[in-house]
Structures are given as C-alpha cells and as structure tokens.
Amino acid sequence: MIRTLTGAMFGTAMAVATLVTGTGVASAAEEVNVYSLRQPFLIEPLLKAFAEQTGIKTNVVFAKEGVVERMKAEGANSPADVILTVDIGRLNDAVEAGVIQPVKSATLEANIPANFRDPEGRWFALTQRARLIYASKDRVKLGEITSYEELADPKWKGRICTRSGKHDYNVALLAAMIAHHGEAKAEEWLNGVKANLARKPQGSDRGQVKAVMEGECDLAIGNNYYYGAMLADPEQKAWANVVNPVFPTIGGTKATHVNVSGVAMTASAPNRANALKLMEFLSSDAAQEIYASADFEYPVKPGVKWSPVVESWGRFTADDLPLSAIAELRSAAVKMVDRVGYDG
Ligand code: FE
C-alpha cells in the first residue's frame, strides 16, 4: 500500500502540502514524508531542489507544535519518515520520546561536524543560529560588553532585558554555561544576570530589542536571525536600528554559543532509503546554502557560503562544545532557572 498524507488522516489542525511531484519517471513509491516544525517558506525551496535532483516526491505536514505527541499517538503506523525542527531541546525531546531511529551515513558524518550531530546518529543539525547580545547604540559603547559572563557584572544593574529563562533558547545558553563553568559558577552567573534585569522576563527575543528602543533596558539577548527579520520588517526596522549586534564569547574561549535546527529519522519510517537520501541532500553544499540563507541562519557544513546579509554582521566562531552536551544539561539548567527564581 502506498502511504500518502491526506487532510483526512491529520484532521484540520495541520496544513498538508504535497510538493513537486516527480517527472513521471519515478514510481509512485518514490516519496518521503516530512513532519516539519519549520515554516513552509524555509522548506519548500529545498524540497523542490531535492525533487529535481532525485525525482523523489515529498509530502509535508507543517505544524507549529505537537509533532512528537502526534508521532507517539500514531506509533508504528506513523507515515512520517523524518522530522525537521528547531532547537537542540526539541530534537532531544523526540529522541527521548522514542520516536527516532539512529542513522549511519558516511555522507552526513563527512558534511556535519561532530559537535553538530548526535554521536549515535539520532539527530543531525542542519543550520546554526548564534545567541547574541543586542546592545544599545546610544548607551553602550562598542566593545563595552564582549562575553555572556559580563552580563552578570553589577555595572549592568537594571539594564538587561530577556525573555523567560525557561525558553528553549535560554535553557540551551545556560546549559552551555554549566558545561563551561560547572553548576556552582553557572548558578552564580544566573543570579547575577537576574539581579541586573530591568524587568520581569517576558515576551519574545524581538520584544527585548523593542524594549531597548523604548529605553527600558540597554542590553537584550536574542538569536541572530531576528536581527535580519527585524531589519526586513517595516515596523521592527526601527527596533533593530537602535542596537549593535554583539557576538559574545563563552567560557574564556573566543567562540559564541550557538543553537541549531536539525533533522531526525523517525523510528517507523516507511520510506527509509528515501529519507536517508533527503537527509544527505540537506547536508550538501547547495542545500546548506539555500537553507541557511532563507532565515538569516548559518550553515553547519564548513566552507559553505554565508548569505551576504549575515556576512555583513561580521564573522564569528561557533563554540565547539558538542550540542549533545547541551542536551544532557538541559534539565539541570531548567532546575537552576527555578532555583534562582529567574522568571520571578
Ligand atoms: Fe526563534
């Protein structure tokens, strides 16, 4: 039986799109089913290129959340072959839910540096995003802050805005701080940052930059791609224009904390061979360049060209701390956020 994704199977909560059928040469069985937490505009150009190159048709379920829950409910009958998602936390959640199978691929191992993939092959990063400090152009001198550690310096008292400490992006940053400094020092740091907050953590990454524009704080923490998104937005451009993006260093290195988006093969993948072809394609130079550029992110494959826009913000070195180490320390980080009462 040929599996297809239809609206009836998935109800109306998720949008279902069938992208670019093959040329007619490929048999009906040449397809691969994707559950994507990434948006259509990011994924569609990639899958179109994949279809052109391989003749393999891609069926995509786009969702904002609930993919792991859905796969658990579907069990062995799940039509999904791969999931595409942001954040090491979500990749790890899928692994822990038991809905992922390990993949061994010389191509993936050659294209994706070891720190950007699970040692057991259960997930592979495809793009990286840096967690930046956005510093007020008016009130913070260039070079006045260069590291995450300095966010705990009392000189910033009442001058920092962040979203919730329990958001995946901040959990990963704190997990990286624990990896670099150990629990005790990381907790001291988090207490220091909390003491410097201008307001109770709230809102989104972009909302913190808006708060800098409104004079509520002088430093905001946010992912790098939001800088591009703000500059491209008629209203938010004014927010981005009041800040300098800073690529902070971590742990005494010259490197910046990064998180990732990635891909994983499902445990029940009915089209395993095609799923592997898609995963390998996504790690190729051509796909890496398309994928990273689409959302102001960075490729994970070394040597792949950065988009001119992100290039213009300056070069940086990504922390080579394995993302798997961050995944392991996430629960310790969440507990620390609670202990410190960061969101209080
Ligand atoms: Fe985001």
Image: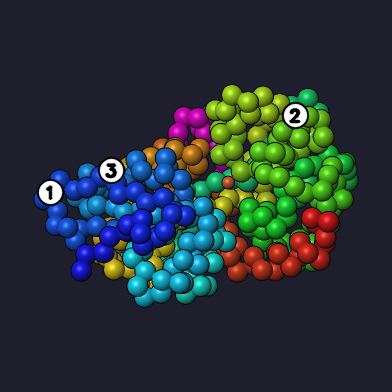
- What is the number of callouts on the image? 3
Q: Residue flagged by tag 1: what amino acid is it?
A: Gly
Left or right of residue 201: residue 251:
left
The reply to whether residue 200 is visible in this rendering is yes
Mark 1–mark 3 CB contact (< 8 Å): no
Marks 2, 1: nearer the viewer: 1
Q: Quadrant location of residue 101?
A: bottom left
Q: Does 273 lie within the magenta span?
A: no
| Helix, strand or loop status at disc 1 | loop
Q: Secondary structure at mark 2?
A: helix
Callout 2 environment at 10 Å: few (<14), some (14 to 19), or many (20+)? many
Q: Residue at x 29, y 43 (%)?
A: 48
Q: Which residues are magenta?
A: 306-317
Q: Is mark 2 within 8 Å of ligand 1?
A: no
Residue 108, given in percent of the width and then of the height, sits at 35, 59
Q: What is the spatial separation of the Cα atoms under label 2 and label 3, in whole angstroms? A: 40 Å
Which image quarter: residue 181?
A: bottom right
Residue type at the position of mark 3:
Ala
